[in-house]
Image: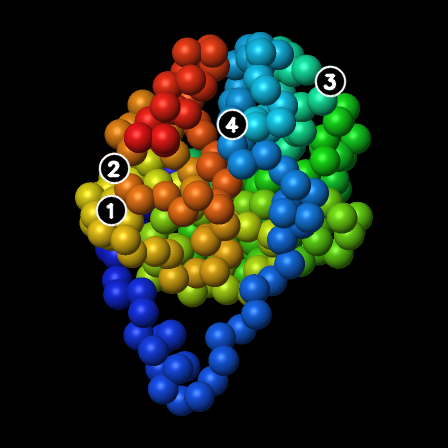
Amino acid sequence: MRFERKAVALFPALALMILSGCKPKAPARNRLDEKHFPSMILWAWERPEELEFLDTRRYAVAFLAQTLTLKGDDVGFAPRHQLLRVSPTTELIAVTRIESQKTTGQRAALTPAQRDRLVTLILKTLELNRVTAIQIDFDAVSSERDFYRALLRDLRARLPDNVPLSITALASFCIGDRWLNDLPVDEAVPMIFRMGADDQSIKSLLSAGGDFGEPLCRRSYGIAVDEPLEMKFEKSRRLYVFNNHAWMEKDVASIQQRIQQ
């Protein structure tokens, strides 16, 4: 996931609302809070993972359930092939990775039929054992945003009302790009790792006490085990953690210790 835009000032719009007497919009519903999801969620990607050691009162698992690829008029389907072991009380989020021209190099038709196929396949992940929430990981380019917005609206309309819907988001989208505004999701997880050219500007902003301009991005953080944690974290937000190898107890302990420091 690459980050393409520079950080911008976060507060002029809020100041304008205050000066003009307008009240900020009330925060949208957050089903993850309603379900009392744990505050730390480990991403389990496509590799064998044995996570039975987790304290399920403190940790949940967001696992890659499938990868869906848009090519031309087609939707390619690749289910998870790797072992995932968790304790019976672990809260699970089924992650669907959507790949398109940014990763395939081939333009997708972005038809209503493709959108319907995606929604159907994503809904099927709810049938997996103990899955109680859905997350979409899609680095949509500008030409794909209307399609993605329509996809999320269709998906939310067909999901049970109490099932949380989460998406990942490039951190630059959360600062200077308003296309996430009013998406029908419970959170947009800002990915503050592997940020490329925007890495220092965004981390400097967060280290100085700044924040993301998009309200949906102010409910969680996405970080990686192998990158330094130099930002100030709001303790009320969930933390999603990526690991570039299979999780071990020492990795979890290390992240917890670094956050506390």
Residue under pointer 4: 43
* Front-most of residues 137 and 132: 132
Q: Position of residue 12 (x, y in %)?
A: 30, 74
Q: Amino acid at mark 3?
A: Pro
Q: Which three-letter amino acid code belongs to the residue tagged 1? A: Ser
Which residue is at the front of the view, 109 or 223? Answer: 223
Quadrant containing the C terminus is: top left
Between circles 3 and 4, the one closer to the viewer is 3
Under circle 2, the secondary element is loop
Q: Amino acid at mark 4?
A: Trp
Q: Which residue is mark 1?
A: 207
Sequence-wise, the earlier of marks 4 and 1 is 4
Specify which label sits upstream in the sequence, 3 or 4.
Answer: 4
Circle 3 sits on which residue? 88
Between the residue at mark 2 and the residue at mark 4, the CA separation in whole angstroms equals 21 Å
The image's mark for residue 230 is 2
Residue drawn where x is 44% and y is 43% of the image:
235
Front label number (2 vs 4): 2
Which element carries disc 1, helix, strand or loop? helix
**Label 2 Cα neighbours within 10 Å, binned few <14 / some 14-19 / many ≥20:** few
Q: In the image, 160: left or right of 69?
A: right
**Residue name at image x 69 percent, y 43 percent:** 35
Q: Position of residue 168 (x, y in %)?
A: 49, 43
Q: CA distance from mark 2 to mark 3?
A: 35 Å
- Whether pointer 2 and pointer 1 mark residues with C-beta atoms closer than 8 Å, the reply is yes
The type of residue carrying mark 2 is: Glu
At a point 26% along the width and 62% down the height, the residue shown is 8
Label 4 and label 1: CA atoms lie apart by 24 Å
| Mark-to-mark CA distance, 2 and 1 | 6 Å
Q: Quadrant of the N terminus?
A: top left
